[in-house]
Image: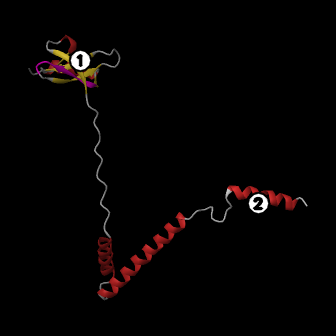
Amino acid sequence: MALREGDALAFLRQKEQFKPSDCNALFSDGRKLPVLIRPDSGQLAVEIEDRLFEPQKLPNFQKFDVKPEEVPSVPPAPATPTENEIFQARLKAAREANPSADGWLLERDVRAQMFREAQTQKYSARQQGQDSSFGALPPKWAAFAEMNRRARNSR
């Protein structure tokens, strides 16, 4: 049943007082309707044919069912390009930058650049992985060395 224009404004103003809740009303005939709640009074309502009704007072009402929480899907991580793909992309950029240069010279330069970058990464990883306590005495011997230092300085 469609609302008349004059009734629509009153219905919309009444519906405006209700907010969506986190549950649905289940009925024995298989219907599942979203439940609206009025924040100031806690009144519950379901909308049927442009009218609001209290779900507990409707025939065939069974129970309230909590809506499942929507889990946002995690986008897949972008695929990391392979070494060959990186090489091809750099070679293409080098050819665009130097169109008159010989192809094998450009390949050699790109390979050399990638080799230097790989060596730099290995070196920096090795430096970061070193133990910062290199050359320090273990606690067992540090106490002994401290005792000798005190004895030497007290003379």
Q: Which residue is at a point 70% across and 56% down the rendered structure image? A: 140
Q: Which residue is mark 2?
A: 145
The residue nearer to you, when weighing 45 against 152, is 152
Q: Which residue is mark 1?
A: 45
Q: Are marks 2 and 1 in contact (CB under 8 Å)?
A: no
Q: Which residue is at a point 81% across and 60% down the rendered structure image? A: 148
91 relative position to 26: left or right: right
Mark 2: amino acid: Ala
Mark 1: amino acid: Ala
Query: Helix, strand or loop at disc 2?
Result: helix
84 relative position to 7: left or right: right
* Vertical arrangement, residue 138 with respect to residue 89, above or below: above
The residue nearer to you, when weighing 35 against 139, is 139
Whichever of callouts 2 and 1 sits on the residue coming sooner in the sequence is: 1
Mark 2: give few (<14), some (14-19) or many (20+) Cα within 10 Å: few
The residue nearer to you, when weighing 48 against 127, is 127
Per the rendering, the mark at residue 10 is none
Q: Secondary structure of the magenta portion, mostly?
A: strand
Q: Which residue is at a point 29% across and 39% down the rendered structure image? A: 71
Tell me the quarter of the picture where residue 84 sits.
bottom left
Mark in the foreground, 2 or 1: 2
Which colouring convention does the figure follow?
A: secondary structure
87 is within the stretch colored magenta: no
Tell me the quarter of the picture where residue 48 sits.
top left
Query: Helix, strand or loop at disc 1?
Result: strand
Residue 39 visible: yes
Residue 52 image point, x, y percent: 20, 17
Magenta part of the protein: which range?
A: 22-29
Residue 138 image point, x, y percent: 67, 58
- The CA span between labels 2 and 1 is 81 Å
71 relative position to 151: left or right: left
